Image (cartoon, grey):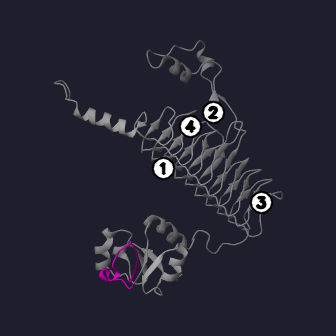
Amino acid sequence: MRHSLQEIAAELGAETQGDATLTVERLAEPGAAGPDDLAMALTPKFADQLVAGRARAAVIWPDADIGALGLEGAIVAPRGRLAMAGLTEIMDDDPVFAGLSGHHSTAVIDPTAQVPGDAVIGPLVVIGAGVVLGPGARIGPHVSIGPGARIGAGATLHAGVRIGARVHIGARFIAQPGAVIGGDGFSFTTMGPSNAERARRQRGGRPLDPPSDPDVEGRWHRIHSLGGVEIGDDVEIGANSTVDAGTIRATRIGNGVKIDNLVQVGHNVVLGADCLLCAHVAVAGSSVLGARVILGGKAGVADNLKVGRDVVAGGGAVILSDVGDGLFVSGHPAKPTHAHRAEQRALRRLVRGPGDA
């Protein structure tokens, strides 16, 4: 679908330069953009590509000279990535649900489920007893929604998503393919002290004491998850990520939280509003994260910890103790990044001894 620069700028609340009646069909990188594309030239580093390329229209940085760049029209984006968010929404033709409407004949919908007439229900979907879907729901193929789940207006569940029983989700939820919400938490106990308990007590000072009865002490007893999951509005969960159900109370995900692919959120965890969890993050059971926490890729949070609001943890950071508000932490164990970097510099300055390799 074609859009004029004037229409796009109005949607973004941006200004235009040159011929605002130019129409474009798709977004493209500056070096690859053709006459029908909108080149994404958000910073001056793309100037040479625009001059050498075939684009007639582009999204440009403030103070750019469209004549010098060889452009006929442009949209000015003071904040490039924010413009990217709006542009990709405008230009998204939504191929996953294109052409789908109504309820597919292979879907299995319990008679007690409340499914709105405008919902799109794809092939081989299973919707359990007492489920309530909000208006505008879009459910992709092979999705299952467990008994008693409630999902707010405008939800999009992509292929293979699993929503467990007792999961309550707010409006405009997005789950990417393979996400699992509300599976049982990883919670087990032993009849006597487990090796994990012994290890904590002895702190690695000596070999673990042998159990008094090896046939009994190592057997794990499941602690069942009865608490479900509560998710706020405007939450997105990435492909193959998991949010476990709480043990007694619900695991809670606040409004606006964004979770990347392959992330694990354990039972009873609380994520404050607008947290951002990057790929391979793991948050262990019963930890509480304040609002706007960012966890970089492969970061981890141990169980039963409190991470304050506005904390940023660098990639690979391993948080093993409580973290106060507003800190930037790195390393293993995680500590304030300036201290971690100082330690790394000191290590690099150490002189190797004669016996070192």
N-term-proximal mark, 4 vs 1: 1
**Residue at (59, 12) in percent of width and height:** 212
Closer-to-camera residue (247/234): 234
Where residue 290 sits: x, y (%)?
57, 43
Q: Real-space Cα distance between discs 2 and 4? A: 11 Å
N-term-proximal mark, 3 vs 4: 3
The residue indicated by pointer 1 is 279
Q: Identity of the amino acid at label 3?
A: Ile
Q: Real-space Cα distance between discs 2 and 3? A: 32 Å
Q: Is residue 16 within the magenta segment?
A: no
**Dot 3: what SS?**
strand
The residue indicated by pointer 3 is 109
Q: Quadrant of the N terminus?
A: bottom right
Q: Real-space Cα distance between discs 3 and 1? A: 33 Å
Q: Is residue 63 within the magenta segment?
A: yes
* Quadrant of residue 115 within the rendered picture: bottom right
Give yes or no for contact between labels 2 and 1 (Cβ–Cβ under 8 Å): no
The range drawn in magenta is 56-72
